[in-house]
Amino acid sequence: MDKELVLSYKIGVVGAGSWGTAISDLLAKKGYKVDLWAYEQDVCEQILSFRENKVYLPDFSLSENIFPSNDLKKVVSDKDMVVVVVPSHFVRNVSKEMETCISDNTVVVSASKGIENKTHLTMSSVISESMPDFKKENIAVLSGPSFAKDVVRGLPTLVAVASFEKSTAECVQQVFATPLFRVYTNSDVIGTELGGAVKNVIAIGAGIIDGMELGLNTRAALITRGLVELQRLGLKMGADLKSFTGLSGVGDLILTCTGDLSRNHTVGKLVGQGIKIETILSDMRMVAEGVKTAKSVYNLSRKLDVEMPICHEVYHVLYENALPHESLYRLMTRDLRDEFGYQD
């Protein structure tokens, strides 16, 4: 692919939360002029006036190459690449609005992580369903262990991009790659997306463990068994199991379950300390995707008959007022089954 052509790309980023802002700054510092769509007028005005997103990514000076706007059509129209970074429950409506103004040859990159509650679709499938005339081969997904604050600080970060079309994945790779932001490509769209979604549910569970002060042994066990649950669901849905040992699987899982910057871990930790989920969410302006995804994973796993006890207990705590110590007891006293030397 012609690197000079790639560097001339016109790029739009849809969503000015912390991750959308960090992505915009990454691309803008590489030399792209990035149109950034912000839903909130105050966020748009802050970036224009102060070169800072004081709501979602405070204390970081943003590139002059970022051009914020509240006009979605302006941000999306006539672009070579559009990156979708809105919360998962907004992806469908935003995609429907995009359909009326997006070009046929635009590459659409989903950087949103989640599973839709009603349909149980991952975000790339939501985009495809919302834009039925748009070519599926032009859609890619970006995932991996990548806290927004570390990316905007310029710390070394590795991510994965997946697409059904190899040239699409390679295009995204060239657009995003820098000496401090390394991008790997693959064709396992569903596995890459499941890793990014389910890890948020497991991270809430890890946060609950930490909030209850149950120690590092317990957290390590939960992360390990959470990976098994992710693999079970992925296998049932046709994913490549190798994806779950890579960046979008175990890499993102470890980061989100242990990092202090993880919103999902923070939510779980507060729940483990005895604070009601309604109180926690009412005090948050940013979205913890794992809360909504917990419902999706619970219902999807039951529909597909996939055993995911940790994810189920997180759901019971969040949505059925189950007490964390009771959920822990149920997990610890589940029947053990010997499977040729491997206890599952």
Image (cartoon, rainbow, N blue to C red):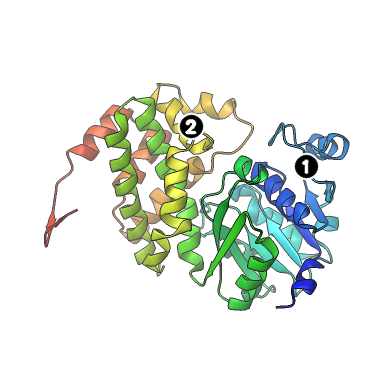
- Horizontally, residue 162 falls left or right of residue 17, namely left
Q: Residue furthest front?
A: 179
- Give the labeled residue for mark 1: 62
Q: Secondary structure at mark 2?
A: helix
Viewer-side residue, 290 vs 157: 157
**Residue extending farthest right:** 49
Assess whether mark 1 and mark 2 are in contact (beta carbons under 8 angstroms): no
Q: Amino acid at mark 2?
A: Val
Q: Where is residue 211? Give x, y as percent.
A: 39, 26
- Image coordinates of residue 284 in percent, x first then y, are 60, 29
Mark 1 Cα within 10 Å, few/some/many (few <14, many 20+)?
Answer: many
Residue visible at 63% across and 66% down in the picture: 173
* Quadrant containing the N terminus in the rendered view: bottom right
Whether residue 294 is visible, yes or no, is no
How many angstroms separate mark 2 from mark 1 (CA)?
28 Å
- Foreground tag (2 vs 1): 1
Q: Which of the marked residues, 2 or 1, is nearer the chain's N terminus?
A: 1
Residue 43 seen in the current view? yes
Position of residue 274 relative to residue 209, above or below, is: above
In the depicted view, which residue is nearer to us: 328 or 13?
13
Vertical position of residue 258 compared to residue 237: above or below: above
Local crowd size for mark 2, using a 10 Å CA cut-off: few (<14), some (14–19), many (≥20) = many
Q: Position of residue 222 (x, y in %)?
A: 31, 42
Q: Position of residue 311 (x, y in %)?
A: 36, 45
Task: Residue 44: name its quadrant.
Answer: top right
Mark number displayed over residue 267: 2
Residue in the picture at 80% in, 55% down: 34
Report the number of discs: 2
Of 213 and 309, nearer the camera is 213
